[in-house]
Amino acid sequence: MQNRTAATIDISSAEEPVLKLNNGHTMPQLAFGLYKVPPTEEGESIVLNAIAAGYRHFDTASYYENEKVLGQALKKSGIPRNEFFICSKVWNDAQRKGREAVRGSVEKSLAAFDFGDDGGCYIDLLLVHWPVPGYHVETYKELELMCKEGTIRSIGLSNYKEKDFNELVESNITIQPVVNQFEISPFMYRPSLAEYFQRKGVSVSASKGIGRGECFDKAPIQKLSTKYSKSPAQIMLRWGLQKNFCVVAKTATPSRMRENRSVLDYYLEDEDMIILDSLTSKEDVKKRDERELQSKIM
């Protein structure tokens, strides 16, 4: 398996910015996250509003238990399946039960989406949600088979560190992962980790691209918000775009959905990118690393 060129994009001129992945497929750079979107009519309404706001990339997971709601909303939108990019993830419990359970989990996700049999019955991107020690390599190899069968278009990783990735590569996988998704924002920025994967040709997807909400009132964000006449969320999302990340954000408010997509008409100056780069403390990283270690063994 050879390293390939990391995804690149000119975000100044794109109506819908996309990343070109290392397997030739493209992925919309602005993603709507479904974590904690309820599996109810309310959740379906949230997704429909996101579609109306312009989102075509939706990020869910079997663990979120809302794949059915997403599928229902996509069908109600009347927009063809091939205009959407759907990312889901296989959870830890299926990994521990073995490859048959991994396959069953993906098939359950497809059944929940209910995309139909007219060429739309596939998942654009399937991630290994956590690199569960002793199991994630076999999980990935089962996903390779499903990718070759056409059930999955691309395979990716989530919450992988360098050691996890090296273990995977050294197991003689035959399909290179296209993405590694992990928490990134100006308040949780681990540049060495992001740059490592980008050098390997693996695109980086920033979950919680606008942090956890409590950061909006921080003085540096407020100052830049005033300077650019943009909201704190727009400042943080724009930072992620200029880092060449896919940025995942979630809100239940339609006006904020539209606002979160209105980030293509300006650039953050280099000096301001440096300010945003510096907002993550060593203590923040330590706490996040500890949480990630625990999540691997959940």
Image (tube, rainbow, N blue to C red):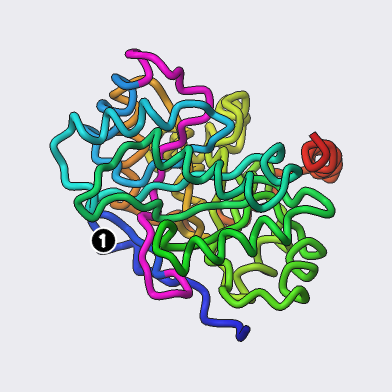
Label 1: how many Cα within 10 Å (few below 14, some 14–19, many 20+): few
Q: What range of the chain is rendered magenta?
A: 21-43
Question: Where 124 sits versus 90, above or below?
Answer: below
Residue at the image point whose x is 39% and y is 70% from the top = 20
Q: Is residue 181 magenta?
A: no
Say which quadrant the N terminus sits in: bottom right
Task: Point out residue 18 in the picture as x, y percentages from the top left corner.
Answer: 35, 61
Residue at the image point whose x is 32% and y is 28% from the top = 47
SS at mark 1 in the image? loop
- Among all residues in the image, which is located at the extreme bottom? 2
Q: Is residue 233 left or right of residue 120?
A: right
Q: Amino acid at mark 1?
A: Ala
Q: Is residue 37 magenta?
A: yes
- Among all residues in the image, which is located at the extreme left? 78
The foreground one among 243 and 221 is 243
The answer to whether residue 275 shows anywhere in this view is no
Question: Where 286 sits versus 73, above or below?
Answer: below
Task: Point out residue 269 in the picture as x, y percentages from the top left corner.
Answer: 47, 58
Task: Point out residue 13 in the picture as x, y percentages from the top left corner.
Answer: 25, 63
The foreground one among 283 and 275 is 283
Q: Is residue 208 left or right of residue 84?
A: right
Q: Which residue is mark 1?
A: 14
Which corner quadrant of the image does residue 90 belong to? top right
The answer to whether residue 214 shows anywhere in this view is yes
- Among all residues in the image, which is located at the extreme front? 100
Q: Is residue 26 left or right of residue 61?
A: left
Residue at the image point whose x is 77% and y is 48% from the top = 132
